[in-house]
Image (cartoon, rainbow, N blue to C red):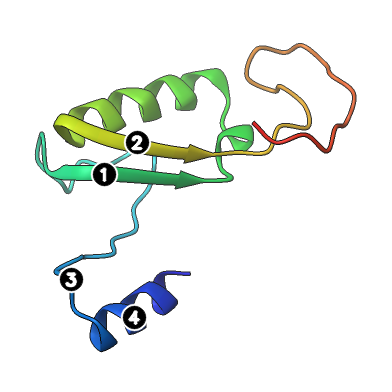
């Protein structure tokens, strides 16, 4: 996905930098660095402690008024420990 975005930026430059990092350790970036953070299909892999750290890191690196695009598919809520039946619904 990142390679495709970089290729499109080469063809039609918009000044977009596509970066990838560890959701629970964004320390290589300073506070209020980004206008947008994009998270795809990752939250169900995090336990409660890592999820809490991730939320803090995203809040730290987002500029005031910035956006966070979160896309996840929930099958089972490992974070809170509640079991839910598998579902094909998207949140």
Give the Cα separation between the discs numbered 3 and 4: 9 Å
How far across and how far down the image is residue 4, in percent?
A: 43, 78
Sequence-first tag of 4 and 2? 4
Badge 3: residue crowd in 10 Å (few <14, some 14–19, many ≥20)? few
**Residue tagged 4:** 8
Q: Are marks 3 and 4 in contact (CB under 8 Å)?
A: no
Sequence-first tag of 1 and 3? 3
**Vertical position of residue 49 compared to residue 23: above or below:** above
Quarter of image, res 20: bottom left
Instruction: Say which mark, if any, is on residue 14.
Output: 3
How far across and how far down the image is residue 12, in percent?
A: 24, 82
**Vertical position of residue 46 compared to residue 2: above or below:** above
**Residue tagged 2:** 68
**Residue tagged 1:** 36
Residue 51 appears left or right of 64 = right
Give the Cα separation between the discs numbered 2 and 1: 6 Å
Q: Secondary structure at mark 1?
A: strand
Which numbered disc, 2 or 3, marks the residue closer to the eye?
3
């Amino acid at each position: 996905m990142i390679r495709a975005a970089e290729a499109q930026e080469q063809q039609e430059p918009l000044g977009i930098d596509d970066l990838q990092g560890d959701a629970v350790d964004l320390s290589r970036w300073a506070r209020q660095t980004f206008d947008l953070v994009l998270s795809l299909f990752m939250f169900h892999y995090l336990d409660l402690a890592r999820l809490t750290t991730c939320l803090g890191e995203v809040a730290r690196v987002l500029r005031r008024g910035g956006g966070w695009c979160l896309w996840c598919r929930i099958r089972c809520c490992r974070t809170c420990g509640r079991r839910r039946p598998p579902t094909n619904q998207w949140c």
